[in-house]
Amino acid sequence: MRTSIRRSTIFTSAAVLLLAACGSNGSAESADEDGQLKLGYVLPETGQLAFLGPPQIEAMKFAIAGINAGGGVLGKPIPAVVGGDEAGQEAVAAQSADRVLNAGVDAIIGAAASGMSLAFIDRVTGEGVVQCSGSNTAPTFTDYDDGGFYFRTAPSDALQGPILAKTIQGDGHKRVALIARADDYGKGLLESTKKALEDGGATVTLAETYDTKATNYDQIVQKVKDSKPDAAVVVAFEEGTQILQAMIEAGVGPQQIGVYGADGLRSEELPKLVSPANPAALAGMKGTAPASASNPQFVAQLKKFAPSLKELQFAPQVFDCVTTIALAAEQAKSDDPGKFAEEIVGVTKDGEKCNSFAACKKLIADGKDIDYDGVSGPLDFTDAGEPGQATIEVYTYNAKGQLQTVSTQVSKGQE
């Protein structure tokens, strides 16, 4: 259960003092509501997830450009965003969040990694500032005590796990080894995949997490081999490169058994990183991730806006974070996070459908209740502030080491 605590209430005493100082006419604007929606971000510009930074940052800028072209929010343009690097380090991410908060933003986009968001979510939501991530997938956030200020457009791994399990079993595998990062993302996806596999009748031969700071991963790979699986799942980030190299050397690579990854390993560069001389070493490896390329119109528009982009992962979800926040501010007629946070769930469901900021804004101006369908798909937020269903991509690497989409599937949770 999420409870919303208005930031305007938190700062009541400060507001009274400010009004007293300015005179009884109340002409000064409050710190929370100055009529202009201000956004910041904490996203990976460096570190192991640096490849996820450009698509998310450019998608955010693209969304803002469209919003401003459509008249802005509350009649004013969203100003240039204040950014910070999560850097794959909790301390750096927290410092970046503090710096962005000090700039007086109303909402923060990010972090990309679930672990990095957990490093500063209390700071952000505790200040009564909205936080929206387009790529946090750890189930931890569903029931997190965020005061009603945290949202995500990326689906929980509770929705991704069943699709991953279905893919593995659909390929005919019955004995599956699971290894994952020892963090909220890794543990959450491991557990949801394990449950779905076992519910489907598969035998899980190994389900173990590993220390991401290990100097090598030979020990965990040996455990995979000793469990005699016909398929193995690796839930990893950058360290997955070393794990896959060790698996190939141990004879449990994609040419010997089924090997599967998830969103943390979905990268066009992965085959070259694992085997620079032979990218085909990963041929046949599959994985799942929240769909990024299922909206060709959005993809074409984003590439035109940012021609240098190579990766698109989580770009649609970040675009939807920004648009949803902007529409909520329009609905609330306020840039006060304590007010527009209460409208975020509502603008994504149970109203008249619209699929752009301009179209939705017009409906709001006409007094209509809206249902924003995002570029990442229908959002239909649950009360927990996250999608009630997910469009999951199944990807693979072909014989040339090229990333390809096999299919997209819908996974539905429970309200």
Image (cartoon, grey):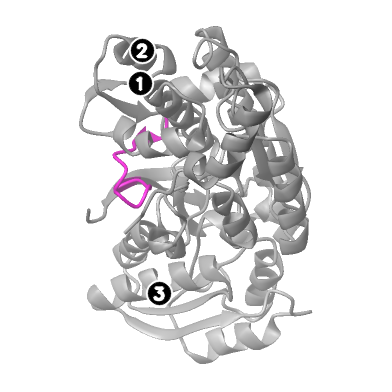
Task: Place residue 200 in its image quadrant.
Answer: bottom left
The one nearer the camera, 311 or 275, is: 311
At 63% from the left edge and 25% from the top edge, which residue is drawn? 61
Name the N-terminal-most of marks 1 and 3.
3
* Crowding near the residue tagged with mark 2, few <14, some 14–19, many ≥20 C-alpha atoms within 10 Å: some
The one nearer the camera, 102 or 403, is: 102
Asked if disc 3 and disc 2 are in contact, CB closer than 8 Å, the reply is no
The one nearer the camera, 373 or 294, is: 373
For the question of whether residue 251 can be seen, the reply is: yes
Judged by depth in the image, the label closer to the viewer, 3 or 2, is 2
The Cα–Cα distance between marks 1 and 3, rounded to whole angstroms, is 34 Å
Q: Is residue 91 above or below residue 129?
A: below
Q: Which residue is mark 2?
A: 359
Q: Amino acid at mark 3?
A: Glu
Asked if disc 1 and disc 3 are in contact, CB closer than 8 Å, the reply is no
Q: Which residue is mark 1?
A: 355
Judged by depth in the image, the label closer to the viewer, 1 or 3, is 1
At 45% from the left edge and 69% from the top edge, which residue is drawn? 188
Q: Amino acid at mark 2?
A: Ala
Q: Which mark is residue 191?
A: 3
125 in the magenta segment:
no
385 in the magenta segment:
yes
Position in image of residue 397 (x %, y %): 55, 51
Position in image of residue 267 (x %, y %): 62, 48
Q: Is residue 337 above or below residue 123?
A: above
Position in image of residue 100 (x %, y %): 72, 41
Position of residue 74 in the picture relative to residue 344 (left or right): right
Asked if disc 2 and disc 1 are in contact, CB closer than 8 Å, the reply is yes
Q: Amino acid at mark 1?
A: Asn
Magenta segment, prevailing SS (helix, strand or loop): loop
* Crowding near the residue tagged with mark 1, few <14, some 14–19, many ≥20 C-alpha atoms within 10 Å: some
Magenta range: 375-390
